Image (cartoon, rainbow, N blue to C red):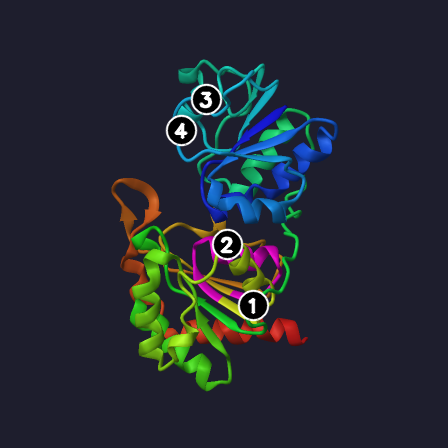
């Protein structure tokens, strides 16, 4: 068995897809098990190649209950906690971390793109990985509409949220242009999504926050006309399905988490702000003031124009 640790969220799983595919191709006869949160199950199915999901929500005791895996792959972080969690495996594929007793593997690079990071790790261990292999399987259409413009104002990290009133103004102007706008989000973001929809003059039926599971959200994005979101999982779904998108980054630089630079239908706007004292090199939310609605609308036009050409 090959156990892969990635106990994080939607964007984290999406950026690990090339590495997961490389592990599948490199070990076709082995059982590939992913240790990740159970709620990611619908998305894991769309990755393909993973034989089993081992529900794992934190970096606690080893996630296996029987014999340890022959190989454990740490796609979660740099250690030491994640390394120690996997320490009982026969072999650990991970970044070098002497505090965890792991002196094998390449050195960590803070400034590396998340996709490149895990591909480089596997290359170091002799497993070739293709960083462009980001596509997810297309889910069934289901009950949700196709051809809509998805506006996703939320994020688990408050500093990553473009102001809600600007999302509302953007949604209103998109609707005035003929876009069928829906507002998505998690169950905890229903109030935020409802406020954005109300500010945009959209009907209550346009608020899908908390009304879709992860598989349905993926289907909605896969069939969408356009996605506008912050630096969060929905943006990574747009990348996976090659759906035109405008992604609003702030404070984390898009060089670490953004879509491939060679895809002009994904437009990235970055509002870095000032350096955050707690995390040098990462901006604060103050940069949002420099990102007006008109600039986002211009990026929408640019993204859509690339599709028409």
Q: Earlier in the sequence, mark 1 or mark 3?
A: 3
- The residues tagged by marks 1 and 2 sit, at their Cα atoms, a distance apart of 14 Å
Mark 4 or 2, closer to the camera: 2
Q: Residues within 10 Å of mark 3 (few under 14, many from 20)?
A: some
Q: CA distance from mark 2 to mark 3?
A: 26 Å
In the current view of this chain or complex, which residue is farthest to the left? Answer: 277
**How many neighbours does mark 2 have within 10 angstroms: few (below 14), some (14-19), or many (20 or more)?**
some
Q: Is residue 146 above or below residue 80?
A: below
Kindly identify which residue carries mark 2: 214
Please tell me which of labels 4 and 2 falls first in the chain: 4
Which numbered disc, 1 or 3, marks the residue closer to the eye?
A: 1
Q: Give the quadrant of residue 159.
A: bottom left
Q: Residue at x 55, y 63 (%)?
A: 221
Q: Which residue is mark 4?
A: 59
Name the residue at 38% across, 64% down: 153
Bounds of the magenta segment: 228-245
Q: Is residue 66 left or right of residue 197?
A: right
Which x, y percent locates residue 44? 58, 44
- The image position of residue 105, as x and y in percent, is 55, 22
Disc 2 element: helix
Count the labels in the image: 4
- Label placed on residue 143: 1
- Sequence order check: which comes first, mark 2 or mark 3? 3
Q: CA distance from mark 1 to mark 3?
A: 39 Å
- Percent across and percent down for residue 301 are 53, 76
From the image, tell me which residue sits under label 3. Answer: 62
Asked if residue 168 lies left or right of residue 70, the reply is left
Q: What is the quadrant of residue 167 in the picture?
A: bottom left
């Amino acid at each position: 068995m090959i156990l892969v640790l990635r106990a994080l969220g939607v964007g984290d799983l999406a950026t690990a897809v090339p590495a997961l595919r490389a592990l599948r191709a490199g070990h076709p006869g082995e059982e590939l098990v992913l240790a990740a949160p159970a709620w990611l199950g619908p998305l894991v199915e769309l990755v393909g190649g993973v034989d089993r999901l081992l529900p794992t929500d934190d970096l606690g005791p080893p996630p296996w209950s029987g014999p340890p895996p022959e190989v454990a792959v740490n796609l979660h972080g740099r250690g030491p906690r994640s390394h120690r969690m996997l320490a009982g495996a026969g072999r650990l594929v991970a970044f070098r971390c002497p505090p965890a007793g792991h002196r094998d593997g390449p050195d960590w690079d803070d400034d590396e793109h998340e996709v490149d990071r895990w591909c480089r790790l596997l290359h170091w261990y002799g497993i070739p990985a293709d960083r462009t292999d980001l596509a997810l399987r297309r889910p069934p259409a289901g009950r949700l509409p196709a051809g809509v413009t998805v506006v996703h104002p939320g994020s688990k990290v408050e500093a990553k949220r473009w102001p809600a009133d600007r999302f509302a103004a953007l949604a209103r102007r998109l609707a005035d242009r003929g876009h069928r706008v829906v507002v998505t989000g998690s169950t905890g973001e229903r109030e935020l999504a409802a406020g954005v929809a109300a500010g945009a003059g959209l009907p209550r039926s346009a608020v899908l926050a908390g009304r879709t599971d992860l598989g349905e959200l993926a289907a909605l994005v896969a069939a969408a006309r356009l996605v506008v979101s912050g630096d969060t999982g929905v943006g990574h779904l747009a990348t996976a399905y090659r759906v035109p998108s405008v992604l609003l980054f702030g404070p984390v630089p898009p060089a670490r988490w953004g879509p491939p630079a060679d895809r002009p239908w994904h437009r990235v706007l970055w509002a870095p702000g000032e350096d955050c004292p707690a995390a040098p090199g990462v901006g604060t939310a103050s940069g949002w003031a420099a990102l007006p609605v008109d600039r986002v609308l211009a990026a929408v036009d640019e993204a859509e124009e690339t599709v028409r050409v």
